[in-house]
Image (cartoon, rainbow, N blue to C red):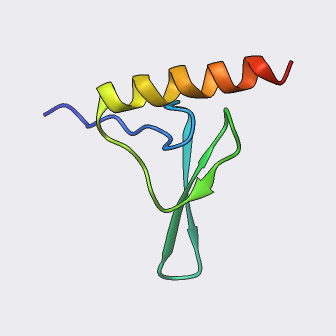
Amino acid sequence: MEKEKKFCPVCGSTELIYGILGTTANYYECKNCGYRGPIIIQDGRLAEKLKDRYEKKNQKHL
């Protein structure tokens, strides 16, 4: 059984670290953009769109 990929909801990266705060608060932290929260994306097509949008947004700020 293949493990489902998890993507950052901000930048579409798969570079996520899973963490636990206390006994019940679970969260993910993205190594790429710094996102930290409980929500992740498991849809690869949506993640690609997020990644493209994130990269375009960051190119404008350079």
Q: In this view, does 6 lie above or below 37?
A: above
Residue 16 is left or right of residue 44, and the answer is: right
Residue 42's image quarter?
Answer: top left
Residue at 73%, 24% in the rendered image: 58
Residue at 30%, 25% in the rendered image: 45
Residue 3 is left or right of residue 32, and the answer is: left
Nearer to the camera, 34 or 58:
58
Query: How many numbered marks have been drawn onto this rendered protein structure?
Result: 0
Nearer to the camera, 23 or 7:
7
Quadrant location of the C terminus?
top right
Residue at 25%, 36% in the rendered image: 3
Q: Position of residue 22 (x, y in %)?
A: 59, 81
Q: Position of residue 33 (x, y in %)?
A: 69, 37
> Which residue is the extreme one toward the front?
60
> Which residue is the extreme one toward the bottom?
23
Quadrant location of the N terminus?
top left
Nearer to the camera, 59 or 48:
59
> Which residue is the extreme one toward the left?
1
Q: In this view, does 56 lie above or below 11?
A: above
Residue at 68%, 26% in the rendered image: 57
